[in-house]
Amino acid sequence: MTHNQSRDIAIIGGGIGGLTAALAFARQDANVTVYEQAPALTEVGAGLQITPNGARALNALGIDNDLNATGVTAQAVVPMDAVRSREITRFDLSTQNPPYRFYHRAALIDILARGCEAAGVKFKLGARISGLNPDGSFDIGDAVVRPDLTIGADGLHSVVRGVINKPTEPFFTGQVAWRAMIKTDKSDPVARIWMAPGRHMVTYPLSGGRLNIVAVQERSGWAAEGWNHADDPGNLRMAFADCGWEVKSILGEVETANLWGLFRHPVAEKWHSGSVAILGDAAHPTLPFLAQGANLAIEDAYTLARCCNADASLAAALQTYQDTRRARVIKAVEAANKNARNYHLSGVQRRIAHAGLKTMGKVAPAAFLNRLSWLYDHDVTR
Ligand SMILES: Cc1cc2nc3c(=O)[nH]c(=O)nc-3n(C[C@H](O)[C@H](O)[C@H](O)COP(=O)(O)OP(=O)(O)OC[C@H]3O[C@@H](n4cnc5c(N)ncnc54)[C@H](O)[C@@H]3O)c2cc1C
């Protein structure tokens, strides 16, 4: 069945979710146009972990050769005692199929954009959409665009979410995050989670000899929500000043850093209305503690195209899309919220947690991945 054939699909937002949706619909012969506010398809200079559940959907869209050539294949996740500079244990990731990989965001966007262009997707860049009409149409300059389906893939501050949902207030989690990148030729292909009381840092290598850093600290005051607020790297070093030599040596190399506040947003009640649907961060902004925001956006995008292709009625297809996705997404969002607390323990709780991890690594190393099998083994292409 190919109900998407010749449907006109407008996608607002050319991030990872929007481009995945564009490629998925274009592969089913829809006429797809992406409206992106930025003058070029770009991404912030940061890394992204694509776990097997996200990789399955991307591979099914026919970009697997480029993905295989670009990512760094993860061998393990390694919890670290950041204060003592000690490896607590190591959980194997090398058996994951498809592989768990680390990408530079810009590289992933580039792969998706090239796939979209080859599949006939049109792009309107520098096109900020400021609202939708009740029928899902929207204005671009003097023209009105009236697609069969308008998809809001417009991220954290989604305009489209607000059109189909009541406003909700995000709340500050009491945590701020820095992102930074340094040059390194020494890093092995593992994700390290450096845990300290009230703080943690995640590092992993990217192609081209770079190390991606995300560092999180508990704070009562907050920085703005968003990705691009520059901060003095000295503040980042200061926040981890009592940590061991390895953390200090990594942070000593940081030349530029960005800081922002971490907020929790409720998952949207409605993911569709009439001929409008939302996906990715527009529907469910997710804290970065499970590395799932982009993976979930990819799963959403694939599922949305698949549901629409399987049903002549868009209304029925969009309801199936929401029913298929919402419970899984809520579970992932809650799991990410919980990780934030687990990384930041102090005192006796910290000692017990580290001892538990160590024992698990020795006695039942598979238990780590077994606990995440609901997440990583999920296959939206089946
Ligand atoms: C520190 C950190 C680390 C992370 N690490 C990971 C990770 O390892 N793995 C993972 O899966 N996720 C990770 N995430 C989450 C992930 O980055 C996001 O969930 C993901 O980028 C969401 O994709 P999206 O396409 O929904 O939104 P976005 O990537 O935000 O894209 C939205 C796009 O819409 C455009 N846009 C917005 N408004 C408009 C408008 N009105 N008109 C036109 N265009 C518009 C924007 O310019 C943008 O291009 C991390 C997040 C953070 C903060």
Image (cartoon, helix red, strand yellow):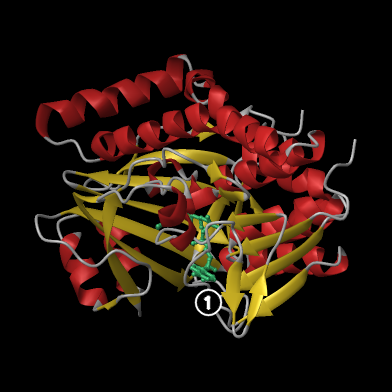
Q: Is residue 178 visible?
A: yes
Whether residue 189 is visible, yes or no, is: no
Give residue 263's position: percent from left, percent from top.
27, 52
Tell me how many marks there are.
1
Residue 258 horizontal side relative to residue 173, left or right: right
Q: Is residue 372 left or right of residue 124?
A: left
Instruction: Identify the residue position indicated by label 1 in the image.
Output: 128
Pinpoint residue 22: horizontal percent, then vertical percent.
Answer: 72, 58
- Amino acid type assigned to the residue bearing label 1 in the image: Arg
Reply above or below: 102 against 349: below
Query: Which residue is at the front of the view, 32 or 67?
Result: 32
Judging depth in this view, the residue of 15 and 323 nearest the camera is: 323
* Residue 134: image location, x then y, percent: 52, 57
Q: Position of residue 74 (x, y in %)?
A: 60, 45
Q: Residue at x 68, y 38 (%)?
A: 303
Q: Nearer the viewer, residue 346 or 64?
A: 64
Residue 178 vertical placement versus 373 (above, below): below
- The quarter of the rendered structure image containing the N terminus is top right
Q: Residue furthest front?
A: 134
**What is the secondary structure assignment of the residue under circle 1?**
loop
For the view shown, which residue lies furthest in the top direction?
363
The quarter of the picture where the C terminus appears is top right
Under 8 Å from ligand 1: the CB of mark 1? yes
